[in-house]
Amino acid sequence: MKLSVTQATRKELDEIAAWRYEPPHDFYDGDQEPVVNPERFFTARDGGELVGFYYFEERGDVLEYGLGLRPDLTGRGLGLDFFRAGLEYGRERFHPARIVLAVAAFNERARIVYERAGFAITGRHTRSFERWGDVEFVDMEER
């Protein structure tokens, strides 16, 4: 993949909201939580084709990082390169002292990708969702 990353448009966010993942990853379906801060979303394109998105939130000198790969591209071994591309973009754009992320505890394949990219588990927390109830998350930070 040769990715280009740009600020997400409303049209792109609407397209992402229509994405549907297979269970249990349907937790990440694009319409589960409304986009409150669209300025924090960036799209990734490969040859003009929308392949995923990145989310960045600055909190002082810490950058919170999130991402999503298009559902039909998951499970194909693309995750590590996709993750690293967003990580590099975040470093270049925001120059953070630290980068952190949170991933649903059940999402082992994502956690493994993050560990391969140099992130380590730093804690856990729980969030409540109307549709899913209480969901445990694993907090991770770049080593």
Image: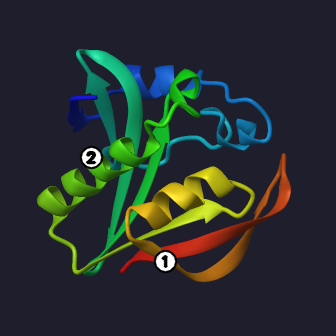
Q: State the quadrant of the C terminus.
A: bottom left
- Residue tagged by mark 2? 85
Q: State the quadrant of the N terminus.
A: top left
Q: As shown in the figure, which amino acid type bears the numbered disc 2?
A: Ala
Q: Locate residue 17 relative to residue 117 in the image: left or right.
A: right
- Residue placed farthest to the bottom in the image? 122
Question: Which sits in the foreground, 114 or 116?
Answer: 116
Q: Is residue 59 above or below residue 92?
A: below
Q: Locate residue 103 relative to residue 9 in the image: left or right.
A: right
Q: Position of residue 21 (x, y in %)?
A: 68, 30
Residue 38: in sight, yes or no?
Answer: no
Q: As shown in the figure, which amino acid type bears the numbered disc 1?
A: Ala
Name the residue at 48% across, 37% down.
77
Q: Position of residue 129 (x, y in %)?
A: 78, 55
Q: Position of residue 48 (x, y in %)?
A: 25, 15
Name the residue at 34% across, 44% down.
81
Question: Which sits in the foreground, 36 or 66?
Answer: 66
- Residue tagged by mark 1? 120
Mark 2 and 1 residues: CB-CB less than 8 Å, in contact?
no
Q: Locate residue 94 relative to residue 82 in the image: left or right.
A: left
Question: Which sits in the foreground, 117 or 96?
Answer: 117
